[in-house]
């Protein structure tokens, strides 16, 4: 599909039926967050995608999942094994830096705007090099290639909670123990987000 000619899709055809979808970027980010959640089963992840993306869940669940994933990939087939690629950003971990970069580069307030997922992805891929987010991504890429300078390695260690997507705070065991006590001995419960 040529994004310059046709409007972004708001419906998905499955077999001979057309299903309306919710293509807002915030909705799609919630779906991606679910797929990144290691505590959810693949069935739970698919269920979340189906209920958030489709306004009415299609009868052909298998096709709905495949077409839903294709929609999230902006119309591209998902044939690549991305599990071997290093992650250089996270919509969850880097949210405030992405928000700022989108505002700085495109003058878009993501909190105020309703944006189609495909438009969001296009704008996201064109975030300016002079943003803090781009500098973070650049440092992560250099780290994965083993190309960090001595000063950059020092910066990476000092700012680990920002730069390292896999960073766990030293007190994570203490936090886990706190959550266990907070939840009356059950550390599987987490407080609701505000």
Image: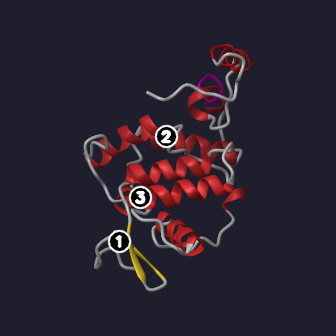
* Residue corresponding to mark 3: 121
Q: Which mark, residue 9? A: 1
Quadrant assignment, res 123? bottom left
Q: Earlier in the sequence, mark 2 or mark 3?
A: 3
Q: Element under label 1?
A: loop
Closer to us: 146 or 36: 36
Q: Which quadrant of the rendered structure holds the N terminus? A: bottom left
State the residue at coordinates (52%, 57%).
49
Asked whether, in this view, residue 50 is left or right of residue 17, the answer is: right
Q: Position of residue 72 (x, y in %)?
A: 48, 63
Lower position in the chain sequence, tag 1 or tag 2: 1
Residue 185: give x, y in percent of width and height: 72, 17
Residue 116 versus residue 76 in the image, above or below: above
Crowd tier of the residue under label 2, counting other residues whose Cα lies within 10 Å: few below 14, some 14–19, many 20 or above: some
What residue sits 68% from the left and 13% below the top? 181
- Secondary structure at numbered mark 3: helix
Most foreground residue, 113 or 58: 58
Instruction: Please tell me which of labels 1 and 3 falls first in the chain.
Output: 1
Residue interval drawn in magenta: 155-159
Q: Are marks 2 and 3 in contact (CB under 8 Å)?
A: no
Q: Quadrant of residue 99?
A: top left
CA separation, marks 1 and 3? 14 Å
Q: Identify the residue under disc 2.
A: 135
Side of 173 relative to 7 (left or right)? right
Vertically, is 47 above or below 170?
below
Q: Residue at x 31, y 44 (%)?
A: 110
Question: Extreme front residue here?
Answer: 59
């Amino acid at each position: 599909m040529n994004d310059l000619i046709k409007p972004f899709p708001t419906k998905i055809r499955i077999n001979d039926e057309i299903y309306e979808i919710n293509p807002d970027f915030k909705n799609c980010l919630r779906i991606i967050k679910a797929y990144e959640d290691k505590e959810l089963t693949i069935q739970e992840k698919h269920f979340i995608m189906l209920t958030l993306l489709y306004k009415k869940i299609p009868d052909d669940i298998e096709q709905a999942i495949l077409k839903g994933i294709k929609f999230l990939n902006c119309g591209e087939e998902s044939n690549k094994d991305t599990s071997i690629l290093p992650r250089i950003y996270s919509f969850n971990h880097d949210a405030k830096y992405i928000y700022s970069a989108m505002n700085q580069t495109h003058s878009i307030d993501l909190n105020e705007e309703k944006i189609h997922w495909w438009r969001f992805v296009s704008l996201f891929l064109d975030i300016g090099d002079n943003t803090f987010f781009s500098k973070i991504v650049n440092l992560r890429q250099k780290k994965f290639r083993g190309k960090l300078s001595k000063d950059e390695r020092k910066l990476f260690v000092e700012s680990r909670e920002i730069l390292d997507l896999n960073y766990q705070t030293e007190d994570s065991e203490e936090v886990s123990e706190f959550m266990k006590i907070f939840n009356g001995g059950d550390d599987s419960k987490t407080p609701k987000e505000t």
